[in-house]
Amino acid sequence: MSSNTLGVRQAQKQKTRQALLEAGLGLLEEQSLSSLGLREVTRVVGVAPAAFYRHFRDIADLGVALVEESLGSLHVMIRAVLSEQADAEEVIDRSVEVVAAHVRLHPAHVRFVARERHGGVRAVREAIAAELARFGDEVAEALATQEVSDGWSAEDVRMLAGLYVDHLVMTASAFLEAPPEEERRIADTARRQLRLISLGRRHWRDA
């Protein structure tokens, strides 16, 4: 078998896997993962149910892959913002902008995470918790390099990172549920709340 044939097969396999993910995500707009059937997903894609198992062990495994897809790009963008050499106000504004843009571009992904974070599929709950914990570690790494973190313990920096991550997830959920005319108010509130955290950060070592 030629390398070209292998490449075509690999590309087709990846295309089918992505189609299954997109079909699952689309169906999850109207239901929870615990109620989603494997045959529903394969019917949308137009493949036999047996083909599903070439890509995922079960529906929970598909859900875990959706978690990685849903949160992965947001990690990269927020970490990039936090690593910028900018003042706190600018970093806060950029963080809120990034979250708002992510929700506009990927509403189904955000809705999936918001619904399944406390949903009925344990593997997916654990995957979301693990991704958010990793997100917190990445944010902590970026925060630790900032001058205002001088003298902070690693535990306190990680606690602060957890506050930022929780707030950004909450803000994403608020953007998701809001009509367009409410977006500016939500963004303003999110910025003010992050500034409050930032002010507390500057005085934490005095507490």
Image (cartoon, rainbow, N blue to C red):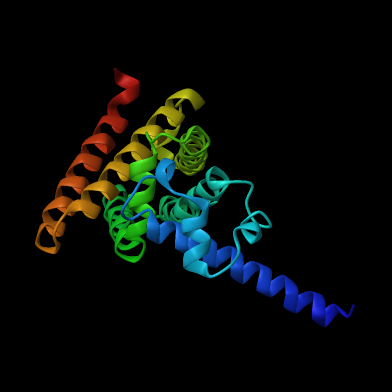
- Residue 67 shown left or right of residue 169 in the figure: right
Residue 170: quadrant of the picture:
top left
Residue at (21% x, 46% y) in the render: 190
- Say which residue appears at 9% left-offset and 62% top-offset: 181
Residue 53 as seen in the image, left or right of residue 25: right
Vertical order, 195 against 26 (above or below): above
Residue 163 point in image, percent of width and height? 34, 33
Quadrant where the C terminus is found in the figure? top left
Question: Left of 159 or right of it: where is 191?
Answer: left
Give how far across and how far down residue 63 sits, in percent.
Answer: 50, 47
Question: Does residue 137 appear left or right of residue 30 in this picture?
Answer: right
Residue shown at the point (66%, 54%) measured from the top left: 53
Seen from the viewer's position, the closer of residues 106 and 38 is 38
Count up the numbered dots. 0
Quick one: which residue is furthest to the top in this view?
207
Where is residue 159 drawn, in percent x and y?
41, 28
The residue that appears at 53% across and 36% down in the rendered structure is: 123
Report the front residue among 193 and 172.
Answer: 172
